[in-house]
Image (spheres, rainbow, N blue to C red):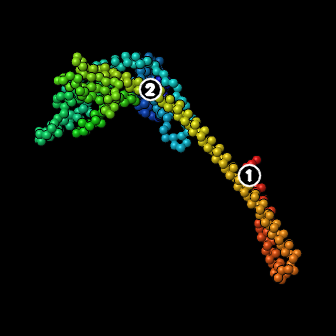
Amino acid sequence: MDTEFTRKELYDLVWSQPMRTMAASLGISDVALAKHCKKADIPVPERGYWARKQAGKPTVQIALPPRFPGASDRVGASPGNNNWGSDWAEKFEEVAIPPVPTFDEDMPSVQQRVRKLVGQVRCRRAFAPAHPLVAKLLSHDDERRKDFTKWRSDYYAPRYDAGIERRRLLMINALFLAAARLGCRPSMSTSKYGQDASSERDICITIGRSHVHFTIEPIKSRKEGQKERLRLAFGTARVRANANKFWEDGDESPLEDQLTGIFVEMLVSAEVSYRNGLIRHREWVIGRKADAEAELKRRRDEAERRARELKERLERERIRRLLFQAKALDRANQIRTYVESARLRFAEVAMTEAEFEKWASWALQEADRIDPLKNGAIAQALEEPCHGS
């Protein structure tokens, strides 16, 4: 779909006329239009809606639900294009500055809606059910268990049978299942032997257009002999030391009991990230348009400078040719004068008259050759554009 709409604009369109008619006007199939609507959580008329409406029978128009946290309010082709090429400034000059972002809900209302949407996130004591990514890690554990039985090496020891790694994976499983239930996309590494590397500990849930990264890692006990605790922090493993949002095991509140609030905060953070992204994008467009304006001015100034330098160079060249022609005319006249003077004193020359006239003819031809009045140099100069005028 080449045209971009807001969710409300597309919602109004698909409820104003049959899907097939609307899709044809947009240059796509009704199936493609339905997919766009489904992806944007826009309800469409059910089968038979328009027939009942035309027959005067009662119909129900499904209300447009609020936008999912972190999801885009735009549907269809985006006008943005990052492949500007060398003429980016000219193209960007035509880009419109997005309007100041406005939102139907304030953040407290979003948070309240998210709490209802999430309900309860319960961390079970067993992986039943197991999210597909978690099930992959558990299958690796089954393979390690067989290798451990065979080799009796700690390298092959199962990781998720007990202890803090099992707790960690159970919490990841609970969050992943809650995310999948709401249509979000969890992701993490499921390599067999790479889980000790810090980069392999990164976990992410894609919520709408936002990616919420987090880690669940052990923390040092504050008291000697205290049970090892876990800390969930937003951000990647590389920057988790600077995480500004984190939750820890408490004496009366283990991390498992905080998962509901944590997942709510993930959804809210995704919405905040989406809103901040719109603001940053608008600021970026404004800044980029200013860059484009400055670049176009620089190009104009550069073109004017080059034109001015070319004009000056052509003028200098024309004057150089003028002086050369003046000298050529002087030389031509000097030759003619010399020939006439020699003819007057022919009697003093030791040559025959025929020999003298042969020489004189050659000399006068040379004078005519370099004479700008006779060789066309002046006429050619008159045809040149006069850059000084």
Mark 2 closeness class: few <14, some 14–19, many ≥20 residues within 10 Å: few
Q: Mark 1 is on which residue type? A: Pro
Relative horizontal placement of residue 286, taking residue 155 as reference (left or right): right
Residue 231 in view, yes or no:
yes
From the viewer's side, name the closer residue of 179 and 292.
292
User: Residue drawn at (81%, 81%), measured in percent from left and top?
Assistant: 355
Identify whether 389 is placed above or below 282: below
In this rendering, position of residue 69 left or right of residue 127: right
Q: Residue at x 44, y 28 (%)?
A: 277
Residue located 86% across and 78% down the image: 346
Vertical placement of residue 184 versus 253, above or below: below
In the image, is 160 to the left or to the right of 336?
left
Mark 2 or mark 1: name the one nearer the start of the chain: 2
- Callout 2 amino acid: Asn
Q: Which mark, by number, is residue 385?
A: 1
Foreground residue among 43 and 263: 263
Residue 101 in percent (x, y) is at 49, 24
Give the class, few, some or many, for how many residues have Cα within 10 Å of label 1's Cα (few <14, many ≥20): few
Residue 241 percent coordinates (x, y): 32, 29
| Callout 2 secondary element | helix
Circle 2 is placed at which residue position?
Answer: 276
Give above or below for 363 relative to 70: below
Q: Where residue 261 sits: x, y (%)? A: 31, 20
